[in-house]
Amino acid sequence: MVESLNHSARGLSRRSFAALALAGGAVSLLPRQAFAAGDAGPLEALAVTCIDYRYVSHEVNWLDTKLGKKTYDLAALAGASLAGVSQMFPASVDALWNHINIARTLHAVKKVMVFDHHDCGAFKQEFGPNYAGEGTAELDQHAAVMKRMKAEFAHRGWTALGVGLEFYFFTKEGAEPTRITV
């Protein structure tokens, strides 16, 4: 039996191999370049939203319109403001403060924007029979949690670093959020 000496019959010529090796080498440089391009400078904000699928796209659309695309980091944790102070979900508390630290370290965010919403399941679980329900009572309960988060924010030193904190509340899907001052 005679073995063919035709390199193309084996699938890869020396030239093809060299071109492939060169392309592979070039591609190996991309992650460093992509990281450098993605780490171009400070971002406007870290937006903290609830995980509720009914609101996330509305929040992102609102942020894109108000701040501009690619000007903020996004973290989604159940209850949004509740994630900063929850007694029922301590892992979420750690996750939120870690996200804030990472956003500040990597992208020098100027502020944290927190988006709560009407009919939040995390609030229902946290407060159980003491969940406020609807209307003014519900908004007051969210504002009380936001106030606790604001105090924790200051306690952890973020206010002293010049990082701002803003709270918003969506009353229904697709509506403009209301800015809450606590």
Image (cartoon, rainbow, N blue to C red):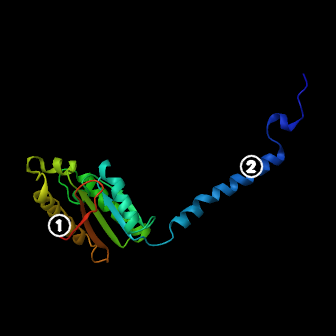
Query: From this viewpoint, is residue 55 visible?
Result: yes
State the residue lying farthest toward the left: 130
Q: Read off the residue under disc 2.
A: 20
In percent of the image, x 33 and y 58: which residue is there?
A: 59
Q: Residue at x 27, y 70 (%)?
A: 165
Number of numbered discs present?
A: 2
Q: Is residue 17 left or right of residue 126?
A: right
Q: For the C terminus, give its image quadrant.
A: bottom left
Q: Position of residue 29 (x, y in %)?
A: 64, 59
27 left or right, relative to 174: right
Q: Marks 1 and 2, Cα distance to the nearest angstrom? A: 59 Å
Residue 102's spot in the image, x, y percent?
A: 38, 64
Relative side of 82 to 41, left or right: left
Kind of residue indicated by mark 1: Lys
- SS class, disc 2: helix
Of the numbered discs 1 and 2, the one sitting upstream in the chain is 2
Mark 1 residue crowding within 10 angstroms, few (<14) / some (14–19) / many (20+) = some
Res 147 label: 1
Task: Out of 40 and 5, give the one closest to the viewer.
Answer: 40
Q: Position of residue 146 (x, y in %)?
A: 19, 64
Q: Give the label, 1 or 2, closer to the camera.
A: 1
Residue occupying the point 46% across, 64% down:
70
**Camera-side residue of 173 and 24:** 173
The kind of residue tagged 2 is Leu
For the residues labelled 1 and 2, say whether their Cβ atoms are less than 8 Å apart.
no
